[in-house]
Image (cartoon, coloured by chain):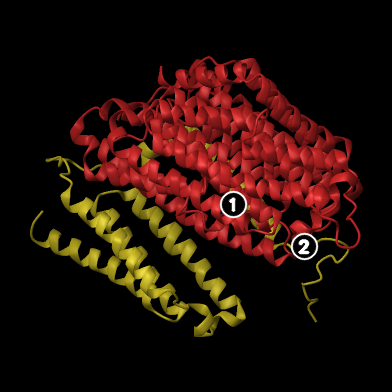
Chain colours: A red, B yellow
Amino acid sequence: MTPIAIDASAMMQGLYCILPEILIVATALFVLFVDLILPEENRRILCGVSIIGVALSLFTVFAMGPGKISGFSGAVVHDGLGAFFEIVILSACALTLLMATGYSEWEGTHKGEFYSLLLLSTSGMMFMAKGTDLMTIFLGLETLSIPIYVLVGFHRHRMSSVEGALKYFLLGAFASGFLLYGIALMYAATGTTKIAQMVPMLYDARLAASPVFLAGVGLLLVGFAFKVSLVPFHMWTPDAYEGAPTVVTAFMSAAVKAAAFAALIRVLLLTLGGLQPVLWKVLWVLSVLTMTVGNLSALVQNNVKRMLAYSSIAHAGYILVGMVSGDVLGGQASLFYLLVYAFMNIGAFGVVMLIAQKEDEGYDIDNLAGIGFKYPALAGLLTLFLVSLGGIPPTAGFVGKFYLFSAAIKHGYIWLAVIGVLNSAASIYYYLRIVVYMYFLPAKGEVPVPRPPRIAFSLALCASASVVLVLGIVPSSVLEFAERSVLSLLM
Amino acid sequence: MTGPANLIFYALAALTVGSAVLVAVLPNIVYAAVALLFSFAGVAGLYVFLSADFLAATQVLVYVGGILILILFAVFLSNRISDVKISNPARFQWQAALLCLALFGVLSTTAVRTVFPLKHGLTYQPTTAEIGELLMTRYLLPFEAASVLLLAALIGAALLSRPDGKGKGSADMEEPK
């Protein structure tokens, strides 16, 4: 056996390629150490340290630009798609941390472990978004999931938190098993785990139709479908989202979904050339099922957190619409929607978090009655985010849905677009129901007093709101960025 | 592959699958754990049969030596689990059977219908050195990413199993008398 040479310059290039991830992991370790020496009452510093780390990492992503840098013999690549999703994931993480400053004080999650787990999970997501080897993607997925399981169960005294964590853990472990089995079968069929090497093989019709490969792709899809909670693999979502501390729910709904979709988009867009005739039907059915079941279940929820959980399932369906067509236009629409979705969903969770006094009971929809005119700023923000989730202009949610459905129509999936629009119309009912509760229903007894937000919290809400509004009015630059990202993948 | 080799293979396969079925069926969790031991050992045997020496040793060390012992410890240390009714209940049997049969159908047709390319005249060589070298060169990133994963798992486990720290100290630990 000849030894494999690995020279210094290749090593440096590899390290440079994963610099944003290195920064995040280093911050996570630093937070752990600082937590040891810091006195109990100064725990807020930990949050600040984490935010600085995330900001540094975000800056590095911008500084590195969209140029393609691959490292570690093709295990990761820093390209447009990776950069785009790193920006989405890091922004979601930053918003979560800003909100956590206040939330941790109210609910007692000010612990070094909370922040370092959040950061480690973020690093896993970034690896997943950049992974070009199925092995890297799998390890990223696990690094993402395990801290999230723990964070969901962070409130050990609350039954719902523990229940959510256990369900998420068990089903998530199954999903990982399916994913790994899928990767193993794909390896058996092609002899490689590198996506780039798999792609040219797929033009061979014998491989693309071979049962081992198809079974592998199917199992891989099942694994991903669990993670982004596509129907019928969505069973864990409402319980996990309801039980988790609300900051974690916001983070899960935005960042975990973005990371899993990043890997899915990379795998699907690259392999679709060979598999398109089989795959689009599967994706079509999954997308329609996910949208419909998600929206119909959300209609009857009285707990706001649970309602937003079902709404996030439905949104995964919308995002999948862009991937059915499997080309630049659809990919671009999916990317744009994922970015917008992260901001509007975290924003909505943020406002709800302020209004609810307590976990569990605080999230009942009755609790929102009478808020509207008493706290106009909060109610206005929540209305903005809900309107955007429902897809009404002039918000970014409308632009995102418009591009998703027009991509579907352009490729001739008329029925898919029709079902999507109908679903979107149905979803407006339950989003506006909250608005009606806030403005038009009198409170039963006392109007609950929302918590006074800290500066960081207000900053997070304002940032989300401005992104939702600005992208709703002038989306072109971000759309171009999304298009370039998808193109850089296909080059 | 003929003669005794064939026989050994089928014996190992039967051991693996048979014990795995027992794990799923046995009502007592301790029996199930012991059946799992045989299943793991059977898989290790299959690895030896494929001349994957490193994998076989790891299988024995990690699964038989580590995970199984941990399962048994967990069973013996948690007091109420020895009750058969809560330890290993079976519900939704029909639905589960249907789902499993469907999955089994897919996987078995896959296995039967695929034409696997066979390589003839291979000489088997020890793999450990090569794996070690690959881990430090070509697969360096996955290797290091796995260490981050382990760190996260450790932090999480410590966090979830530790008693709440506020002022109580180690309230759940009894002083030795």
Q: Residue at x 57, y 42 (%)?
A: A425
Q: Is residue A115 above or below residue B112?
A: above
Q: Residue at x 88, y 40 (%)?
A: A454
Q: Nearer the viewer, residue A436 or B124?
A: A436
Q: Nearer the viewer, residue A436 or B168?
A: A436
Query: In the figure, is residue A488 to the left or right of A397?
Result: left
- Dot 1 corresponds to which residue? A310
Q: Which chain is indicated by disc 2?
A: A
N-term mark: 1 or 2: 1
Residue A88 visible in the picture = yes
- Quarter of the image with the C terminus of chain A in it: top left
Assign a secondary structure to mark 1.
Answer: helix
Residue A34 visible in the picture = no
Residue A393: image x %, image y %?
65, 30
Q: Which chain is indicated by disc 1?
A: A
Looking at numbered disc 1 in the image, what kind of residue is underneath it? Tyr
Query: In the figure, is residue A254 to the left or right of B24?
Result: right
How many other residues sit within 10 Å of disc 2, few (<14), some (14-19) or many (≥20)? few
How many other residues sit within 10 Å of disc 1, few (<14), some (14-19) or many (≥20)? many
Looking at numbered disc 2 in the image, what kind of residue is underneath it? Glu
- Dot 2 corresponds to which residue? A361
Residue B73 position by quadrant? bottom right
Residue A337: image x %, image y %?
57, 32
Q: Is residue B57 above or below residue B91?
A: above
Residue A22 position by quadrant? top right
Residue A45: image x %, image y %?
85, 39
Work out how far the residue at label 1 is from the one at label 2, CA to CA, in angstroms. 18 Å
Which mark is on residue A340? none
- Quarter of the image with the N terminus of chain A in it: top left
Assign a secondary structure to mark 2.
Answer: helix
